[in-house]
Amino acid sequence: MVQAVKNSAPLRVGVVGIGTMGSNHARGSNHARVLAGLAGVHLVGVVDPDPAQREFVTRALGCPAIKDLDGLVKLGVDAVTIAAPTHLHREIALNCIERGIHVLVEKPIASTVEEGDDIIAAAKRAGVTLMVGHVERFNPAVQAIKSAIRGEDILSIAITRVGPFPPRMSNVGVVIDLAVHDIDLIRWFTDSDIVEVQPQLSNAVAEREDIALLQFRTASGVLAHINTNWLTPFKARNVTIATRGKYVMGDLLTRQVTECFGFQKDGSYSMRHLSVGHDEPLRAELISFVDSVREGKEPAVTGEQAVASLEIAIRCLDGRPAATAASRRKREQRIVAV
């Protein structure tokens, strides 16, 4: 059982991994920026091995910047957000969990399913909150789409997530960097597991795959596909969902969501733009994490959900079909036994 932190004192939170300050991909620095402005939260400090990055964040946010996790722990933290490179997630998460520190891990939860299972098992043993940063769920456009399809008989989902090649990438391709967002969204929109995977991958200019066309079928019978690449000169993030009663189109960048409904035999239909909020997704995500820690309630994105999406992404890379119910049960038994 997760132990809630119900005292009235500010929740002491640290950030592990800053990223390149000033870039669009400085995930850790953005975590620190948002946490520094949240009511009821005290940003204890940030951790990064790069002295220049530590100096920058100290000037920008006025909080301590430490070179290693031990130094942050000594300052006293209730929770941390981990935005370090993926291959370090398991080591850092286990280190924090073993000290009774609540953890939010950026997506993907780990490099492998087995490493993700280790993190989940450790959090269960320690009774700490484990949340995974699939931030797209907190995009107001995604929230509006989810509301629009609630109770609908979903037939198909199409997601496009494309853009230019990011120079920072070296050890993963578009499936782990980009498509894992949308694998998670497909599972979340449908409230169903993915049971069939048909991937088409290519590497046109990069060492790893930079084009991916992924087709799926969920246990509930929904057909879905993801189109993602690093070859498009501009960013595009679009979702379209067809149900028996409506057709929903969402632009996740402009946050415009349109719903077509009232289909007639003559081909006519009605259309309306849906109300979409203005919250910063990362801020909403971190508030959700803080609330989970304080109340001891299940986080919005659990470790199990994140591992399930990672497993599908890995199966897209190696061409294997999706996991069977029997294989999922074996994984669950392994987590309990660890």
Image (cartoon, rainbow, N blue to C red):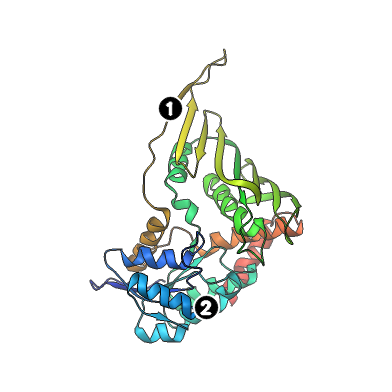
The reply, left or right, for residue 231 in relation to residue 258 is right
- Look at label 1 and name its amino acid: Arg
Q: CA distance from mark 1 to mark 2?
A: 47 Å
- Look at label 2 and name its amino acid: Ile
Observer-nearest of 79 and 320:
79
| Residue at image coords 42%, 63% | 30
Say above or below: 109 vs 65.
Answer: above
What secondary structure is marked by label 2?
Answer: helix
| Residue at image coords 23%, 71% | 8
Residue at the extreme top of the image, as rendered: 266
| Residue at image coords 49%, 52% | 136
List the residue tagged with mark 2: 92
* Residue 243 pos. (x, y %): 55, 32
Task: State the quadrant of the N terminus.
Answer: bottom left
Could you tell me if residue 4 is visible in this image?
Answer: no
The reply, left or right, for residue 203 in relation to residue 265 is right
* Residue 247 pos. (x, y %): 53, 30
| Residue at image coords 58%, 46% | 234
List the residue tagged with mark 1: 272
Mark toward the start of the polypeptide (1 vs 2) = 2
* Residue 239 pos. (x, y %): 55, 40
Observer-nearest of 139 and 205:
205
Say above or below: 222 vs 72.
Answer: above
* Residue 55 pos. (x, y %): 42, 77
Disc number at residue 68? none
